[in-house]
Image (cartoon, rainbow, N blue to C red):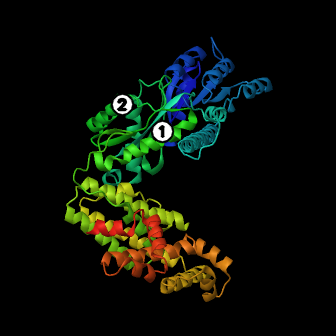
Amino acid sequence: MQKVMIVDDELIFRDYLRTVLDWETLGFSISQEARHGLEALELAAAEQPDIALVDITMPFMDGLQLAEKLREDYPDVSIVLITGHNEFEYARKALKLGVEDYILKPFSKDELLLTLVKLRQRHQKAQEEKLTLRENTELMKESFLSQLISREYALSEPDTMKRLQQLGIQAEPGYYVAACIEIDQMDRKWSKASDRLLMKYAVTNVLNEAMEESRDYLIFNGPEGRIIALARHPEEQENELPQLESYKKLCFLIKKYLNFTITVGVGRSKHGFKGIAASYGEALEALQNKFVLGNDRVIAYGEQLPSGGNQPFYPTEANDELLVLLRLNVWEPIERKLDDIFQTIRERRLPIDYIYVICMGLVSVNLSYFEESGHPVEDCFGDHFFPYNEIRKLDTAELTFDWLKELFRKSVIYNGKHRNTRSSKIAKSAKAYMEQHYADPGLQLEQIAAHVFINASYLRAVFKKEIGITVSDYLTQYRMQKAKELLARNSARLTDIAEKVGYNDPGYFSKSFKKFYGYSPSEYEKSRS
């Protein structure tokens, strides 16, 4: 409801204006009445009106003087002059002062109503424009600050300062520390996006209070629903961890007053605006350790993860093998490999935190495959795919295993559907030919190209584009995979195995095996005994 001030020295006319319209029904309220300009200014200082209906002829300060003063002190107030003087000079002065309208006494009820409706529409449009401008400005700020934490950020320090000033952001060069704040189990607690935004807004408000002792800081919404805080520490040194009291205070206040928990990852101090991305990367890495260290806490970069004790080290080659199987894009061997990994976890009775570490490694393998193939992750898993959050929603290891298998299955189905072009058919045909003739030591690119009826150069380009690796690398991968399967059976001599996978020279085969896996065939056999 818009507030209207009536300013006139005649009580009769003030009474008339108060009763001539059903103000409340029309969306207005008579908030103030003044007898002259000086009294009007006092009332406006206490409560600023939206519209001022001002008589020109008044004692102490006339309407034109009041209009000038109101326009100077309260530029958003709409002023309508009401007078019995039908003189051009008054109108000219009124327009010069920025008065919205000019009504001559006597005026009709409809004339007043029309003027007020016109002003209300003007007010609404101005408010909408201000809101849009404010929202656009905030979006531009968040967009730029998101660029600032990116490792691809390339602007110089002076250019960064200039851009910050253009956006109205107060920041100075110095040492910066980045912190990532994540509301624990946010998606599980609040299904509506509006509720999640409200909680993030509440955390940001408390964060401002907790950071009040810091000299300079910037707070904004970052990737994957996190809140980012960039604090400037003029007296810090490179790679120093800051005092964590402010962040611990934030965790305490959120838990006490908002009844949910957050986890904060904090990076080390880095010099200059270009160092912010490095500090952010450390803060993100620290935050991701919550899967092992637990949530509802502050985690500083470099904080030691608990020792695994007698727990076995998860072999990195398992992830490499899965990546190779994804490139083959056949579900059955991928499912068998995942089942083997999950069965090992069950048999060893690994703790849930260690399981999370392994599972996040498996997620990374899947996402790496998408990045390699050039397909957008969102196209397969949706726009709101946040795997770290989704895994933490799952209460048991078995549910986590099922979720991961579904993730890999979706990848295989998606990539199978998107490989039906002519180029993909050529690549698939070449791949099938290599899988059939990999034992031939003389198998060459030209022979494979002849089988699919194209020249070698074109096959080289098509295969790399569709499969993600070169023809020779794929042939080597497939041979090494088959060699490992034969070694696992302990059913043949090294010379025979080399020959079965396309190597005439057992010594060269051993070197190739070690180069591919990081250990020799004999070392692999010993590890399994």
**x%, y% of residue 290?**
32, 47
Q: In the shown orientation, is residue 327 left or right of residue 409?
A: right
* Rendered image quadrant of residue 480: bottom left
Q: Is 326 placed above or below 310 here?
A: below
Quick check: 67 above or below 135?
A: above
Q: Secondary structure at mark 2?
A: loop
Instruction: Find residue 279 and name its label.
Output: 1
- The percent position of residue 440, horizontal first and vertical second, equals 51, 85
Residue under the point 65% across and 88% down = 453
Q: Which residue is mark 2?
A: 244
Amino acid bearing label 1:
Ser
Residue 271 visible, this angle: yes
Say which of 206 and 86 sits in front. 206
Q: Element at badge 1?
A: helix
For residue 99, what is the image quadrant? top right
247 and 12: which is toward the camera: 247
Residue 202 at least partly seen? no
Residue 174 vertical position relative to residue 310 in the rendered view, above or below: above
